[in-house]
Image: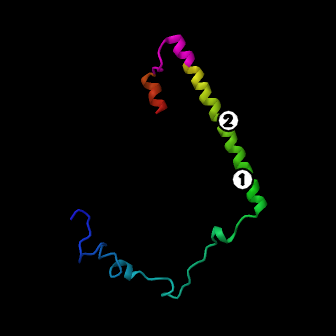
């Protein structure tokens, strides 16, 4: 059938649908037990000043990482230029051991 829905057939597994396994599941209310209520994140929001401080710290960390990335990319560019000028090759030949340790 190739995964197509055919009229009259069921698009689900009959063993696990309502008449199957799911119908035999016992809920806590059927046994007289109450389900445990866990506190959700929405019920306990952080105070706005604390949210602001967290956002400021996250922004500062993000800016520092962006500057660090820019520096490292520029360093790689300069080193590649120096390597190309001295050897005449554009690609750095790695030994098998060094290539394996980088991968």
Q: Residue at x 72, y 53 (%)?
A: 55
Residue 62 in the magenta stretch? The answer is no
Please say if 15 is above or below 65.
below
**Is residue 84 part of the magenta span, yes or no?**
yes
Q: Nearer the viewer, residue 29 or 6?
A: 6
Q: Is residue 73 above or below residue 56?
A: above
Is 24 left or right of 51, judged from the image as shown?
A: left
Seen as rendered, the residue at the extreme right is 49
Q: What is the distance, in whole Å, between disc 2 and disc 1 at their CAs? A: 18 Å
Q: Are marks 2 and 1 in contact (CB under 8 Å)?
A: no
Q: Horizontal and vertical percent for residue 15?
A: 30, 76
Q: Is residue 71 positioned above or below 60 on the image?
A: above
Task: Give the x, y percent position of residue 102.
Answer: 49, 31
Q: Quadrant of residue 26?
A: bottom left
Q: Quadrant of residue 73?
A: top right
Q: Residues within 10 Å of mark 2 (few under 14, many from 20)?
A: few
- Residue under the image location 35 percent in, 78 percent down: 21
Which segment is the magenta one? 81-93
Residue 85: give its label.
none
Task: Give the crowd class for mark 1: few <14, some 14-19, many >=20 residues within 10 Å.
Answer: few
Q: Residue at (33%, 75%) from the top-left corner?
A: 16
Residue under circle 2?
67
Q: Secondary structure at mark 1?
A: helix
Helix, strand or loop under label 2: helix
- Going by the image, does 90 lie left or right of 5? right
Question: Percent from the top left, x then y, of residue 92?
Answer: 48, 20
Return the residue at label 1: 55
């Amino acid at each position: 059938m190739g995964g197509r829905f055919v009229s009259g057939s069921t698009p689900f597994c009959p063993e696990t649908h309502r008449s199957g396994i799911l119908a035999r599941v016992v809920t806590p209310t059927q046994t007289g037990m109450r389900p445990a209520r866990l506190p959700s994140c929405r019920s306990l929001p952080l105070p706005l000043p604390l949210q602001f401080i967290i956002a400021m710290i996250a922004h500062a960390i993000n800016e520092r990482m962006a500057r660090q990335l820019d520096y490292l990319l520029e360093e790689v560019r300069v080193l590649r230029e120096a390597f190309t000028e001295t050897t005449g090759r554009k690609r750095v030949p790695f030994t098998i051991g060094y290539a394996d340790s980088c991968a």
